[in-house]
Image (spheres, rainbow, N blue to C red):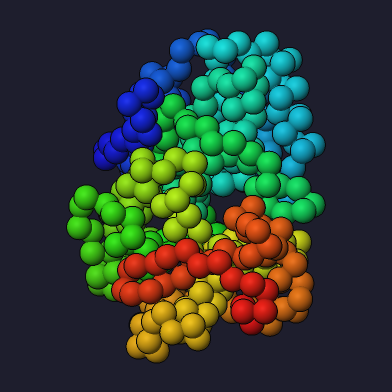
Amino acid sequence: MLNLEVKISAKEEAYPIYIEQDKIENLKSKIAKHLRGNKVLVVISEKVEKLYGKLLGFSKEEKFVLKDGEKEKNFNNYKKILEKAFEMKLTRKDAIIAIGGGVAGDIAGFAAATYMRGIDYIQVPTTLLACVDSSVGGKTAIDTSFGKNLIGSFYQPKAVFINLNFLKTLDERQFKTGLGEVVKYIFIEKSCFCKEELNFSNFINENTEKILSRNLNTLEILIESCIKLKIAVVEQDEKELGLRKILNFGHTLGHAIEKITNYKKYTHGEAVVEGIRFAFKLAEKRGLIDKNYRFFADDILKKFYFRQITKLPENKLLEAMKMDKKSADGKIIFILPIDYSIVKEVSLNSDEIF
């Protein structure tokens, strides 16, 4: 078992991230060691409940089963989770446990952050995307008709349990959407200022086939590397006031793609990959990088056979990007590459983008 730690500030206790390949039925007893109270509300993905509900061992009365899909991260389900917590008479010593992908983790975390002004919560990510991204760092949120993650909070979990066995049953498209967030770290690694030299680009290039075949030992190193880079960023900037913005590489256009296609046509990772491609084109057009680096990026993305996105109306994309929570003073903010594994924030007017 790998054990990483996240320490946001001297005032807050560090919390652990466990990465392991142990039996899923052993998870409940491990989680119990991090609980202060006697009651838990388990917000669990519908797919995960069907596949692993019995193995996980939580009672029907403890569970809120959340349907799958980004559209489920809404006000109505947020309200239902809170109502379930009240019905169970959860106290401030009790906890909410999120078991599933990013949707389950985000909405359960936001419910935990706001129920009685904050109770403990534990993350059990079951998708590659959630393992390398949303389960770590304390971003919790729900979506609105105006855009993604516009209502939320920064609220750190008490622990994160990453069990690689969940990834065995992840469908191919969802596995690839996780790889969309993974490749992001290749292009931002040096800007993360991680104390450890990970050479993530080399690792990805040397282990592409093992990654695609889901070799668990390789995926363990992959996830560990991504999390180390994210921890390095989050510990320096929890609330995205500066450095943490680099984690949005590929997301400005990516979120806009998701929004104008109603979160149905493309997965998050597919949209982010398109956002990465666009960021490289935009950076080359503005003279921030040369064509060789863009070709290098294209070659890496081709290795994973990401789904191509059809051309979308530029006016609709611009409107969606203007509503992005990272936009400011009428300008749209992009994270753009400026050198190998180095990025920076760039504010652009609408007429400078396409």
Measured as percent of width and height from the top left, residue 52 is found at: 54, 38
Residue 261 in the figure: left or right of residue 29: right
Please give the name of the residue rendered at 23% of the width and 64% of the height, measured from the top-left corner. 199
- Locate the C terminus by quadrant: bottom right
Residue in front for this viewpoint, 334 or 302: 334
Please give the name of the residue rendered at 44% of the width and 58% of the height, measured from the top-left corner. 246
Measured as percent of width and height from the top left, residue 50 is found at: 62, 41
Measured as percent of width and height from the top left, residue 302 is found at: 44, 80
Measured as percent of width and height from the top left, residue 29 is found at: 41, 22
Please give the name of the residue rendered at 44% of the width and 76% of the height, measured from the top-left corner. 301
Residue in front for this viewpoint, 297 or 99: 297
Residue in front for this viewpoint, 250 or 216: 250
Please tell me in which quadrant of the rendered image residue 331 appears: bottom right
Please tell me in which quadrant of the rendered image residue 20 appears: top left
Residue 82 in the figure: left or right of residue 166: right
- Locate the N terminus by quadrant: top left
For the question of whether residue 262 can be seen, the reply is yes
For the question of whether residue 216 can be seen, the reply is no
Q: Is residue 187 above or below residue 28?
A: below
Q: Is residue 342 above or below residue 138?
A: below
Residue 290 in the figure: left or right of residue 317: left
